[in-house]
Amino acid sequence: CKWFCTYVSIARPEAARPVSARNVRRLLSFQRYLHSSRFFHGIPASNPLGYILDDDFTGQAKLMLQKVGNWNFDIFLFDRLTNGNSLVNLTFHLFNTYGLIELFQLDMVKLRRFLVMIQEDYHCQNPYHNAVHAADVTQAMYCYLQEPKLAETLTSCDILLGLLAAATHDLDHPGVNQPFLIKTDHYLAALYKNSSVLENHHWKSAVGLLRESDLLSHLPTEDRLNMEERLGSLILATDISRQNDYLSEFRTHLDKGELCLTNGGHRHFILQMALKCADICNPCRPWKLSKQWSEKVTEEFFHQGDIERKHNLEVTPLCDRQSNSVANIQIGFMAYVVEPLFVEWSRFSDTRLSMTMMSHLSLNKQGWKEGKDKQEASSSRVSEEQRTPATKDSNSKVLPQGSKGS
């Protein structure tokens, strides 16, 4: 424990910043990981990575990670099996799978600490934009990185940045959207001049944690700054307000057949598109998983609408629970946002995974439409039943006052 205290005092000097509740949570989380590791108990391991993996995963969680590239991967179950540490454990596993720890000479203690800080900086009270969503996006990103066109051409640096961007793409998300921050004069809106406010914040937060953890401090300064910039470019691509710009460029590249993945710029663009797909892939998951995500994101939308109504602000249309439903929101989202993007992705990567995603998308859209029709039919019957007694009463004979029937 003396080594641990010395490490913490060097990495995060007390005089440099006040101790916040979040910093204390990070410290305790990291300390828990250290004490559960064989390495820090002085027990040697034949596999240099095994001491971290073996003690931190339950048997079932480890079995799940053997199928981490399966599109049916249940991130909700994995999060329960890892006691709420799905983002830390999944991302560490993927770094290990790709050999990134050795390739980039990453310190495993710094890496674990960095991942714990990321997980802690997601707001667990957000129904949707939380660490489980980040873990889900990271798993989806891994599936895309495994696709033949990408697996054959991506460099180790591309893979490292793709996984980092997926894990941090919504870091410190406040649970409300950009228009809300702008109309409430939030300091972030002023800081980023009302442009990609949340995405800029996620990027800068990620860079802050990279520097705080010293994860890449051993790399040359120029390389480190370049990686930070490329990370930002990936995260900024998730701004949904710029969806049409990216989609139009993607479609043009495909129409002209000019994408060449030996070109670094083209590879980076495909990483941007892969992250965009991973970020909104929920409607392309099996119904059991997709439905849960749909309900969670709608709950977050409606919570924002409730706040807006409470403070006499204009209620954002998608966030108004009085005029919207999960089905309505999802049907529109699938038709106008998800489907156009995944149609183009399927053109680029015509594989079994793409066919599977498009099949789920079609089935899920039909499922929400059928649910909406049933709900409307049920509401119509209820309204009819409520009107029927009133109609009968209005046609009944009115007895004069004082009669035997009164």
Image (spheres, helix red, strand yellow):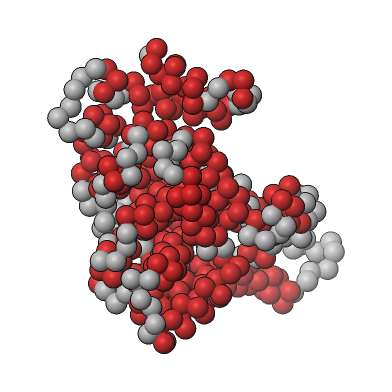
- Residue 71: where, in percent of width, then height? 29, 60
Identified at 69% across, 70% down, the residue is 390
Image-based side of 217 in relation to 304, left or right? left
Residue 396 falls in which quadrant of the image? bottom right
Residue 383 falls in which quadrant of the image? bottom right
Q: Nearer the viewer, residue 384 or 333?
A: 333
Q: Is residue 160 visible?
A: yes
Q: Nearer the viewer, residue 234 or 299?
A: 234
Q: Nearer the viewer, residue 355 or 309?
A: 355
- Residue 207: where, in percent of width, then height? 53, 45
Identified at 26% across, 47% down, the residue is 99
Hey, which residue is sitting farthest left in the picture? Answer: 46
- Residue 308: where, in percent of width, then height? 73, 53
Q: Is residue 134 visible?
A: no
Residue 367 lies, with reference to residue 251, above or below; the image says: above
Q: Nearer the viewer, residue 43 or 119?
A: 43
Residue 120 lies, with reference to residue 325, above or below; the image says: above
Identified at 36% across, 54% down, the residue is 157
Q: Locate the N terminus and report the quarter of the image it occupies.
A: top left
Hey, which residue is sitting farthest bottom in the picture? Answer: 256
Identified at 56% across, 75% down, the residue is 245
Image-based side of 222 in relation to 67, left or right? right
Q: Locate the C terminus and report the quarter of the image it occupies.
A: bottom right
